[in-house]
């Protein structure tokens, strides 16, 4: 069984390589990380386990199909860390129904079924998250994805230290499409579910990042906002 925090959509992928793509999100419950600025703690902290549902692949796809109006769609697996879940059957059955699959993970755990994904976003965590980067685990994820899965690197940047870390990490993986995403310093939290994102601050951070890469003559990354935050602020389920 798969621990599910929420299934929602259709919406658009708001981040990274597939930004703007219509998709249904399948958010799993449980994470091996506790990032300082995590915007989905309700899918991380076991205190919210009672809100998660154990579902099998068939039941998840019934809900996706209800949301998509019976049409095949891009299914985005996120979390929590979806790599902690047994998702092989979901990929097999979903593909047989014509869906495609993208997944977001921090790269802390590799699974053989990464090779069955259409897209994999690896989002290792910068110093500001207070989480470690374990290179051998990240590289195990790359190896598991293999040649048939489109892998990209999406790095969250909160400050200059994160920026320097990102530049150095990215240099070690020159062939990966690279996306830089400003950190939202005021995500909604279980304590403050109505907390607003400050769009002015996010825009200033975005501008800083563009100016930063330009000043460095670093022309490789694409700098993107969290589009869903610009559209819906910190709302959940969009
Ligand atoms: C909520 S995580 C879930 C998937 C997986 N655990 C991971 O971190 O990649 C999805 C994406 O949101 C990003 N994210 C989480 N909190 C954020 C914040 N406050 N500002 C910007 N991005 C954030 C993560 O870095 C990750 O790229
Ligand atoms: N629209 C939208 N795009 C997203 N991209 C990554 C998300 C996530 O929480 O993993 C997310 C999300 O929650 N909503
Ligand atoms: S790895 Fe992802 S879901 Fe887990 S705490 Fe960090 S941002 Fe949140
Ligand atoms: Mg999110």
Image (tube, rainbow, N blue to C red):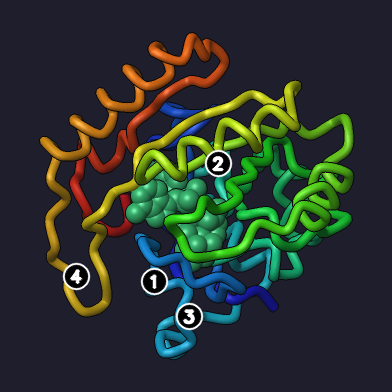
- Ligand 4 has an atom within 8 Å of the beta carbon of the residue at disc 4: no
**Chain-order first, disc 1 or disc 3:** 1
Q: Residue 189 at x, y = what percent?
A: 26, 70
Res 10 → quadrant: top left
Instruction: For label 3, count other residues whose C-alpha is less than 10 Å away and answer few (under 14), some (14-19) or many (20+).
Output: some
**Chain-order first, disc 3 or disc 4:** 3
- Ligand 3 has an atom within 8 Å of the beta carbon of the residue at disc 1: yes
Q: Quadrant of the N terminus?
A: bottom right
Which callout, 1 or 3, points to the residue nearer the camera? 1
- Determine the CA span between mark 3 and mark 2: 34 Å
- Determine the CA span between mark 1 and mark 2: 24 Å
Residue occupied by mark 2: 165
| Label 3–label 4 contact, CB within 8 A | no
Q: Which mark is residue 113?
A: none
Q: Residue 143 at x, y = what percent?
A: 88, 44
Which callout, 1 or 2, points to the residue nearer the camera? 2
Q: Which mark is residue 193?
A: 4
**Chain-order first, disc 4 or disc 1:** 1
Residue occupied by mark 1: 41
Q: Is residue 150 above or below residue 58?
A: above
Secondary structure beneath disc 1? Answer: helix
**Chain-order first, disc 1 or disc 2:** 1
Q: Residue 202 at x, y = what percent?
A: 21, 38
Q: Is residue 219 above or below residue 192?
A: above
Instruction: For label 2, count other residues whose C-alpha is less than 10 Å away and answer few (under 14), some (14-19) or many (20+).
Output: some
Left or right of 226: which side holds 30? right
Left or right of 185: which side holds 170? right
Res 28 → quadrant: bottom right
Q: Is residue 160 above or below residue 179?
A: below
| Label 1–label 2 contact, CB within 8 A | no
């Amino acid at each position: 069984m798969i621990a599910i925090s929420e299934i929602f959509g259709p919406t658009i992928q708001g981040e990274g390589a597939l930004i703007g793509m219509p998709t249904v999100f399948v958010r799993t419950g449980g994470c091996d990380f506790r990032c300082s600025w995590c915007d989905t703690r309700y899918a991380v902290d076991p205190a919210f386990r009672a809100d998660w549902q154990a579902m099998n692949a068939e039941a998840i796809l019934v809900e996706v199909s209800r949301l998509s109006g019976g049409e095949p769609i891009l299914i985005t697996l996120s979390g929590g860390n979806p790599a902690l879940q047994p998702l092989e059957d979901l990929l097999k059955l979903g593909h047989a129904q014509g869906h495609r699959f993208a997944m977001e993970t921090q790269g802390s755990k590799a699974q053989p079924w990464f090779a069955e994904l259409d897209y994999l976003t690896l989002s290792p965590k910068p110093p500001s998250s207070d989480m470690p980067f374990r290179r051998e685990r990240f590289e195990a994820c790359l190896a598991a994805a293999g040649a048939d899965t489109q892998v990209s690197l999406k790095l969250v940047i909160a400050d200059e230290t994160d920026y320097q870390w990102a530049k150095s990490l990215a240099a070690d993986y020159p062939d990966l499409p690279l996306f830089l995403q400003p950190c939202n310093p005021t995500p909604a939290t279980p304590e403050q579910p109505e907390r607003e994102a400050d769009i002015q601050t996010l825009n200033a951070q975005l501008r800083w990042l563009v100016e930063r890469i330009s000043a460095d003559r670093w022309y490789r990354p694409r700098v993107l906002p969290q589009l869903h935050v610009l559209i819906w602020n910190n709302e959940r389920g969009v």
